[in-house]
Image (cartoon, rainbow, N blue to C red):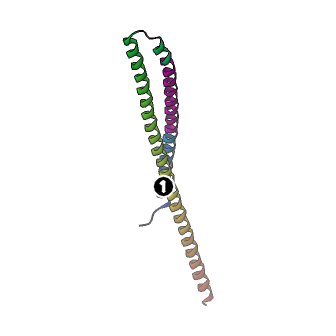
């Protein structure tokens, strides 16, 4: 069974669409990763500021309840930093998967393009060979009386 160029071109169009979709997913993953990174940096800066404020609040606190409230606020800020770190890790993993998917789609497209080039080259060689045979046959018939 021989492949037809039209079939390979259709596969190439499909692979191009898949590659374009993977590129869009990779761009989205990059923006989500950047947003997660900025959020993690922002929450870390907020924790640093909260720690700085807590030291002055601890110095001026007058009750155990106020000390507990300061500790709870710091714990909440630490939890926010941990959550932002987890979101950042998930975004980085999603970005890596999107990059790998884009590489795979691009590789598949190059494979289909090579198959089309090989098929067209083979057809051109076969057509040239057939034409040469026809020319040789016509030339040999003319010599006979």
User: Furthest-bottom residue in view?
Assistant: 145
Q: Which residue is mark 1?
A: 108
User: In the image, what residue occupies the spot 51% across and 33% down?
Assistant: 37
Give the main secondary structure, helix, strand or loop, of the magenta stretch.
helix
Q: Is residue 80 above or below residue 142?
A: above
Q: Nearer the viewer, residue 141 or 64?
A: 64
Q: Nearer the viewer, residue 123 or 67?
A: 67
Q: Quadrant of the C terminus?
A: bottom right
User: In the image, what residue occupies the spot 51% across and 52% down?
Assistant: 106
Q: Nearer the viewer, residue 8 or 80?
A: 80
Q: Which residues are magenta?
A: 27-54
Q: Is 130 a magenta residue?
A: no
Give the quadrant of residue 121: bottom right
Q: Point out residue 81 in the picture as x, y percentages from the top left corner.
A: 45, 29
Q: Point out residue 66 in the picture as x, y percentages from the top left corner.
A: 40, 12
Q: Residues within 10 Å of mark 1 (few under 14, many from 20)?
A: some
Count the numbered circles shown: 1
SS at mark 1 in the image: helix
Q: Point out residue 25 in the picture as x, y percentages from the top left corner.
A: 48, 40
Taking the image as shown, residue 65 lies to the left or right of residue 6, namely: left
User: Furthest-top residue in view?
Assistant: 62
User: In the image, what residue occupies the spot 50% across and 60% down?
Assistant: 5
Taking the image as shown, residue 72 lies to the left or right of residue 120, namely: left
User: In the image, what residue occupies the spot 62% across and 88% down?
Assistant: 143
Q: Nearer the viewer, residue 90 or 69?
A: 69
Q: Is residue 129 above or below residue 95?
A: below
Give the quadrant of residue 82: top left
Q: Point out residue 32 in the picture as x, y percentages from the top left corner.
A: 49, 34
């Amino acid at each position: 069974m021989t492949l037809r160029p039209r079939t390979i071109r259709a596969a190439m169009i499909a692979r191009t669409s898949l590659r374009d979709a993977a590129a869009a997913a990779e761009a989205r993953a990059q923006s989500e990763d950047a947003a997660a990174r900025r959020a993690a940096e922002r929450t870390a800066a907020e924790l640093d500021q909260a720690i700085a404020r807590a030291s002055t609040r601890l110095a001026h606190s007058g009750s155990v309840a106020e000390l507990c409230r300061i500790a709870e606020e710091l714990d909440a800020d630490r939890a926010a930093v941990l959550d932002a770190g987890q979101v950042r890790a998930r975004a980085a993993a999603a970005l890596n998967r999107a990059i790998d998917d884009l590489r795979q789609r691009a590789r598949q497209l190059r494979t289909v393009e090579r198959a089309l080039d090989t098929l067209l080259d083979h057809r051109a060689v076969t057509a040239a060979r057939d034409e040469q045979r026809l020319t040789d046959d016509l030339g040999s018939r003319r010599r006979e009386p």
